[in-house]
Amino acid sequence: MTVPPRPDLPLLPGETCLLRGADEQRALGAAVAHALPPGAVLFLEGELGAGKTTLMGGLVGALDFTDAVTSPTYALMHAYPTPAGRVLHVDAYRVRDPRELYEMDLEDLVAGSRLTVIEWGEGLYRDYPAAPILRLEHVENDPEVRRVERVR
């Protein structure tokens, strides 16, 4: 199922913003969670330590998940049960071929989730052409600030 892009996301395609600290990263995650419709897919890009997991914490926190959020780098997928439905968190960094994720039932997991967030998911962009892409970057000379760009 393809979900059309929503114009009411906190950032429009091509827009950027600066986030000062983890609280602002979590706040953006919460705003995105409330803006995306059920069944949506969101891609997060950014180098290690750019704040993807922190943003994810705000996202699932906004859906009333209260436990710790961790990167699924080694497990590849984490599922967070929320009252609004499951949030699937996928980290495709170590995946050589997207078919590996489909062999792990990615399609069914996405279909049954309130929201799916995929990190390092360039190999899946064509499969979810309407999914927004957010890129987080470090800001030079300011370790607490991140630049976020909505790529699409």
Image: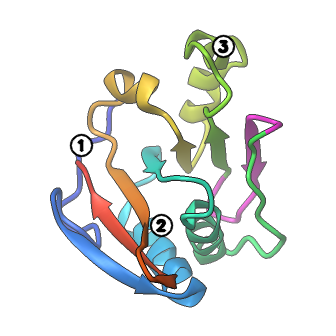
Residue under numbered circle 3:
100
CA gap, disc 3 and disc 2: 27 Å
Q: Residue at coordinates 76% horizontally, 64% vertically from top-left?
A: 69
The quarter of the displayed image where residue 50 is located: bottom right
Q: Position of residue 46 (x, y in %)?
A: 48, 53
- Other-residue count near label 3 (Cα within 10 Å), few / some / many at <14 / 14–19 / ≥20: few
Indicate whether residue 101 is drawn in magenta.
no
In the structure shown, which secondary structural element does the residue marked by tag 2 occupy?
helix
Indicate whether residue 76 is drawn in magenta.
yes
Reply above or below: 3 against 87: above
Residue under numbered circle 2:
33
In the structure shown, which secondary structural element does the residue marked by tag 3 occupy?
helix
The magenta-colored residue range is 74-85
- Other-residue count near label 1 (Cα within 10 Å), few / some / many at <14 / 14–19 / ≥20: some
Q: Amino acid at mark 1?
A: Pro
Reply above or below: 9 against 24: above
What secondary structure is the magenta-colored segment mainly? loop
Checking the image for residue 4, the label placed there is 1
Q: Residue at coordinates 54% horizontally, 42% vertically from top-left?
A: 118
Name the N-terminal-most of marks 3 and 2: 2
Q: Are marks 2 and 1 in contact (CB under 8 Å)?
A: no
The quarter of the displayed image where residue 1 is located: top left
Name the N-terminal-most of marks 3 and 1: 1
Q: Residue at coordinates 78% horizontally, 59% vertically from top-left?
A: 70
Reply above or below: 149 against 63: above
**In front of the other: 74 or 141:** 141
- Other-residue count near label 2 (Cα within 10 Å), few / some / many at <14 / 14–19 / ≥20: many
